[in-house]
Amino acid sequence: MVDIAWTTDRPRFSVTLPGMVLQGQAAESAPVAGVFSDLKGWWDPPSSRGTVTQRSYQHGGWADRAYYSPRVLVLEGSLFGDDPLAVRDAFEAFIGGLSINDLFPLVVTEGSLSRYAMVRLEEDPLVVWRGGGEATFNIQLIAPDYRRLSGTGPAPAYSLTVPLPRTQGGRVRPYTLPSTINATVVSGSVDVLNSGTAPAPVTVRFDGPVSGPTVRMPDGQWLSFDLDVLPGQSLVVDLDARTALLNGVSRRGTMRGRWLVFGPGSNTLTFDAASYDEAARMTVSWSDSWK
C-alpha cells in the first residue's frame, strides 16, 4: 500500500477519514501527493421531504409533516506522482478503505471546532486519469443522520453522572437560636447544553440498584420505567433511537411518560426513582448537534 501525503487548497478546514487526514504539507519524498479541493454538502442546510396534496374544489393544499433527508456529501480532489502505478495503487487503497455498508466517521475541523457525521460510500465514484501520474476524483458519501455532531465520533462529546437527589447534614431539633444550620443538598440534576441548531442525541444510563428509574424536566415532561434495575445491572435509554435496553434486552414496554427531545440551548434532566438508594446513578451522555 502506498501512503498519500495530503495537502489542500482549502486551509481553513481539514477532513479526517479512517486512517487519513486530508490536509497537511506534502512531503517531498512522498511517492504520491494528494490535493483535497472541496467537500460539498457539509455547510449546506439539509434538504427536506414532505407532501402537499391539492384541496378538492378549493385553492391551496393540505400539507403533511416534512422531515429532513439524509445528508449527501461529495469529496473532490486530485492525486499526483511520478509513478503512475503508485498513483493507481494509492487511489485503490484510498477508495478501498471506504465502506459501502458500515458507517464510518467523517470529521471536519475548523479551527478549534471538530464536528462529524457517520457516513458510507454512495453511488459511483468518479475517477479521471489525466495521463502520467495524475488523477482527479469525485466521491459521493451519504450520512443517514442529517445532523453534524460535535467531536470526532462516534462516542458522545459530553457525559455526566449524578446520584439521586438528597439533603444531608444540618441540625435536628431541639436547638438554641441563633444557630447555623449547615446541610449539603445534592440536586441529582444534569444540565444538557446543546450549542448547536438541531435536537441533540441524548443517552441516559441508569445503574442499579434503582427501582422505577425516572427522569424529569422543569416543564413537567417525564420519562419513567416500571422495573427494578438490580445491583450490577444497567438500563440504557437512547432518547434519539427510542430504545431501552436492560443489560442488552429491550424493556421498552415498561416505559411510562413520553420520549424527551433536547433542542438547542440548555435542558435540565433530574434523576428520580420510586425509592431512594445512595448507590443508584444516572449518567447522561450527549453531543451538540447542527442542521
Image (cartoon, helix red, strand yellow):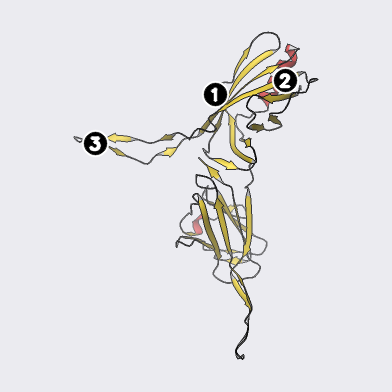
The amino acid type, in three-letter code, at marker 2 is Ala
Considering only vertical position in the picture, is 188 above or below 128?
A: below
Taking the spot 64% from the left edge, 38% from the top edge, the residue there is 111
Residue 259: image location, x then y, percent: 48, 54
Give the vertical position of 259 relative to 36 (above or below): below
Q: Earlier in the sequence, mark 2 or mark 3?
A: 2
CA gap, disc 2 and disc 1: 25 Å
User: Of label 1 and label 3, which has the lower sequence position?
Assistant: 3
Q: Is residue 17 above or below residue 132?
A: below
Residue type, numbered disc 3: Arg
Rate crowding at label 3 as few (under 14), some (14 to 19) or many (20 or more) other CA atoms within 10 Å.
Answer: few
- Residue closer to the observer: 128 or 36: 36
For the residues labelled 1 and 3, the Cα–Cα distance comes to 37 Å
Q: Quadrant of the N terminus?
A: top right
Q: Which mark identifies residue 55?
A: 3
Instruction: Residue under label 2, please give it.
Output: 33
For marks 2 and 3, give the one nearer the viewer.
2
Residue at the image point whose x is 69% and y is 21% from the top: 34
SS category of the residue bearing label 2? strand
Kindly identify the residue that appears in the image at 32 percent across and 35 percent down.
52
Quadrant of residue 8 in the image?
top right
Q: Quadrant of residue 230?
A: bottom right
In the rendered structure, which amino acid carries the disc numbered 1?
Glu
In the rendering, at what x and y percent does residue 101 appear? 60, 32
**Residue tagged by mark 1?**
123
CB atoms of marks 1 and 3 within 8 Å: no
Q: Position of residue 250 (x, y in %)?
A: 56, 53
The foreground one among 143 and 175 is 175
Q: Of callouts 2 and 1, which one flags the residue occurring earlier in the amino acid sequence?
A: 2
| Circle 2/circle 3 CB separation < 8 Å | no
Residue 173: name its quadrant.
Answer: bottom right
